[in-house]
Image: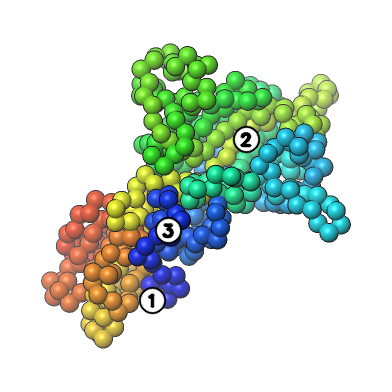
Amino acid sequence: MRQSQLFTKTQKEAPADEVAKNAKLLIRAGFVDKLQAGVYTYLPLGLRVLKNIENIIREEMNSVGGQEILMPSLQPKENWQTTGRWDTMDDLYKVIDISGRENALGPTHEEIVVPLVKQFISSYRDLPFATYQFQNKFRMELRAKSGILRGREFIMKDMYSFHRNETDMIAYYEKMKGVYANVFERVGIGATTFLTFASGGSFSKYSHEFQTITSAGEDTIYICDKCRVAVNNEIIEDQKHACPECGGKNLRAETSVEVGNIFELKTRFSAPFNLSYKDEDGKDQSVVMGCYGIGLGRVLGTVVEVLGDEKGLVWPDAISPFGVHIVELGGSGDDIVRKESQKLYDELISKGIEVLWDDRDLRAGEKFAESDLIGIPLRVVVSSKTIASESFEIKNRATGEVSLVGKDELMAMCKAK
């Protein structure tokens, strides 16, 4: 993409009402726009990052047999009354139409997915399976002050698994721990993200969160470095300040943000909807469930909080909006520089490399500052100086290292997603 054709622009200053690092940088760099507290528009650059995160998650869910669907956000009151959550969920948005019909704007989809799959489950032969979606969620969040880390409208991947018994569900649940670890490793925050024991509520003794260390978080976790697991602050007293894996008490406290969670639902939602199957003896048995959630915007914002620096965004290769940022220096009147920039752009595109080409007539300092702010992993400068030396000046955004390389070396460094 030519940067001159990008309709959005960067900003020198962040909005005065934003306090979160992720919101400040994403707005300044032209990745998101704030409509109101907790509600953001994803602009072209931000949407590219969001879609890259989505594709990574999709690949990992498909790897364990997940089948993708898309369920409605508008959900009938009756389904929520069936589970008893219409009157007990205090962050549920409720809407009434002109006829008096009441619906919920879905904060989650257990009330929809269970009656959906009930149509297709009758025998033990139909189990197990898992289905997932990427869908807008709505929650009446009163603390929408952390940028895209805590929104009132947000995109979530929610997956639900269906099993014959708890043994089968738990085996799948354990597999999902590794799948989630893969997701966070691939998006660039694996080193600082910990499987965290949390309260299971009415479902089980424990649920599990995936918490990433960052000062922007609102949670406190206690980490056992020996086992590389953590305990959420809300259950640390019950756990007697000990690691649930090894029993050790040498735990360190860190501030963190939750980027994903998994729950053993068991029959909490299948029972109210009479979701059952006939076993080998023809007897009715309740379907046992698990659920697995990741907030895509939460992940994106956490990457910014963890990796962003004083100059701007720093994107890992796997989720960056583009792989290469060509910065043309010479202005539109320099035909030779323009020709060489176009040649490099075309060659990279032909190799499947996603490229942003800064073809604007601006001073070098402005272009370099914007390039750092946008945070694409590799900056390539094309100028009369580099053309004369038959080389390209490249900068690694993450390390700040600048070097001169030849054409073949540059091509070897650039990889298609």
Q: Is residue 342 left or right of residue 33?
A: left
- Residue sitting nearer the eye, 238 or 59: 238
Q: Earlier in the sequence, mark 1 or mark 3?
A: 1
- Residue sitting nearer the eye, 240 or 326: 240
In the image, what residue type sits under mark 2? Answer: Cys
Q: Earlier in the sequence, mark 3 or mark 2?
A: 3
Neighbours of disc 3 within 10 Å: few (<14), some (14-19), many (20+): few
Q: Is residue 117 left or right of residue 14?
A: right
Query: What element does badge 2 sit on?
Result: strand
Q: Please give the name of the residue rendered at 69% of the width and 37% of the height, measured from the top-left corner.
A: 89
The residue that mark 2 highlights is 291
Quadrant assignment, res 395: bottom left
Query: What element does badge 3 sit on?
Result: loop
Q: Residue furthest left?
A: 389
In the image, what residue type sits under mark 1? Answer: Ser
Q: From this viewpoint, is residue 49 visible?
A: no
Compared to residue 247, the image places residue 108 above or below, namely: below
Q: Earlier in the sequence, mark 2 or mark 1?
A: 1
Query: Mark 3 and mark 1 in contact (Cβ < 8 Å)?
Result: no
Compared to residue 230, the image places residue 297 above or below, namely: below
